[in-house]
Image (spheres, helix red, strand yellow):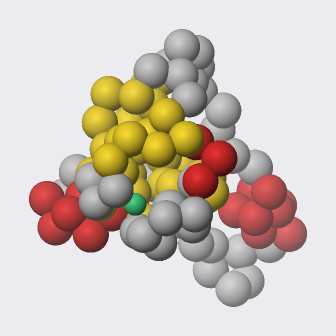
């Protein structure tokens, strides 16, 4: 798999570190209880299909990227700098 870094161009996936889904998790209240904290810390969705993921180009420019990828086919449809994604609200 190759990822088109907006700053470096097309690079092998092994230059990147996968951080996880590019979604904000709702942090539970300090007294929310063990089950709520267990869910927050350990349980993640594992969808089949298009997802938005956060990747770090650790073997290149050190940029954080938001990658839109199909988890079934691994086809990447969009890559943007995380700062640009935040500013655009995307
Ligand atoms: Zn890069």
Residue 32 shows in the view: yes
Taking 62 as reference, is 57 above or below it? above
Q: Position of residue 80 (x, y in %)?
A: 27, 51
Taking 13 as reference, is 89 above or below it? below
Q: Position of residue 3 (x, y in %)?
A: 44, 40
Q: Residue at x 66, y 32 (%)?
A: 46
Q: Residue at x 16, y 67 (%)?
A: 87
Residue 56 shows in the view: no
Q: Position of residue 49 (x, y in %)?
A: 50, 19
Left or right: 11 with respect to 27?
left
Q: Position of residue 5 (x, y in %)?
A: 36, 51
Left or right: 47 with respect to 81?
right
Q: Residue at x 33, y 63 (%)?
A: 82
Left or right: 43 with respect to 28?
right
> Where does the N terminus fall, quadrant-wise?
top right
View extreme (left): residue: 88
- Figure quadrant of residue 41: bottom right
Quadrant in which ligand 1 is drawn: bottom left
Left or right: 5 with respect to 54?
left
């Amino acid at each position: 798999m190759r990822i088109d870094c907006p700053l470096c161009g097309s690079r092998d996936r092994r230059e990147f570190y996968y951080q996880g889904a590019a979604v904000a998790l709702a942090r539970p209240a300090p007294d929310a209880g063990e089950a709520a904290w267990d869910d927050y810390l350990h349980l993640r969705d594992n969808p089949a299909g298009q997802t938005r993921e956060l990747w770090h180009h650790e073997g290149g420019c050190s940029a954080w990227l938001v990658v839109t990828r199909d988890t079934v086919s691994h086809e990447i449809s969009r890559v943007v700098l995380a700062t640009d994604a935040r500013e655009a609200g995307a």
